[in-house]
Image (cartoon, helix red, strand yellow):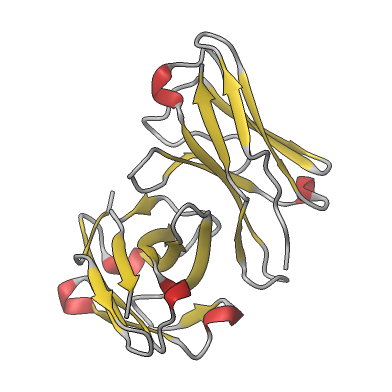
Amino acid sequence: SYVLTQPPSVSVAPGNTARITCGGDNIGIKTVHWYRQRPGQAPVLVIYYDEDRPSGIPERFSGSNSGNTATLTITRVEAGDEADYYCQVWDSDTDPSYVFGTGTKFTVL
Amino acid sequence: QVLLVQSGPEVTKPGASVKVSCKASGQRFSTYYVHWVRQAPGQGLEWMARINPTSGDTHFAQKFQGRVTMTRDTSANTAYMQLSRLTFDDTAIYYCTTSSVRDWYYFDVWGQGTQVTVSS
């Protein structure tokens, strides 16, 4: 199966920029999607197709993907951004077809 | 956009089965797949299976093949997931989520989750 590796935790002070990585073998040739999960809530899509934002997601959220690493970037971090973040890919050649990253607990200091 | 409302929490015993429902509203049932994703306590997200509500076609993660049954009632815009031969490791929150049938690569709407507890 395809493995997506994320750092267990990332911490950033309010107003600064956060970067959460998602590592996978040649992930740059796949499309990566990102979800935010606040405590006790269901996940919410924040980035799809590497860099697109659903309606309602602020421009502070952006994504990139190249080589073996995809990155979710959050600028001007706010307290409300604190959550678990998961990357995800789809791959028809792997089982399961939908793979989630290991998850990153993002803390606003 | 579709809204997904799931059935309430379940407590069940090892070896038994559980059936969770997911009622959709706000968009035609035929325009999206319904997936099931679970999250064990303190753990990450795990994709289990999907169903095309229009055709009934299903696709499973091999791990759950033979233990998961997905059905749907198109007249009620409701999808169901039954998990059988439960073990303690099946204790988790089970989410239904959707992806467009034309753009199935990511999950755009999520239900609120259903807590399933396997306890003797």
- Is the residue B70 above or below the residue A90 in the image? below
The picture places residue A105, in percent across and down from the top left corner, at 54, 36
Farthest residue in the front direction? B120
Q: Please indicate, yes or no, whether residue A50 appears anywhere in the rendered image.
A: yes
Q: How many marks?
A: 0
The picture places residue B43, in percent across and down from the top left corner, at 51, 55
Q: Please indicate, yes or no, whether residue B50 appears anywhere in the rendered image.
A: no
The picture places residue A88, in percent across and down from the top left corner, at 59, 51
Q: Is residue B80 left or right of residue A102?
A: left
- Is the residue B36 above or below the residue B42 in the image? below
Tell me the quarter of the picture where residue A44 sits.
top left
- Is the residue A7 above or below the residue A30 in the image? above
The picture places residue A76, in percent across and down from the top left corner, at 52, 12
Viewer-nearest residue: A72 or B84 = B84
| Image quadrant containing the N terminus of chain A | bottom right
Viewer-nearest residue: B54 or B68 = B68
Residue depicted at x 82% and y 50%: A26
Q: Is residue A104 left or right of residue A27?
A: left
Residue depicted at x 71% and y 70%: A94
Residue depicted at x 62% and y 68%: A97
Farthest residue in the left direction? B76
Viewer-nearest residue: B93 or B103 = B93
Tell me the quarter of the picture where residue B17 sits.
bottom left
- Is the residue A89 above or below the residue A49 in the image? below
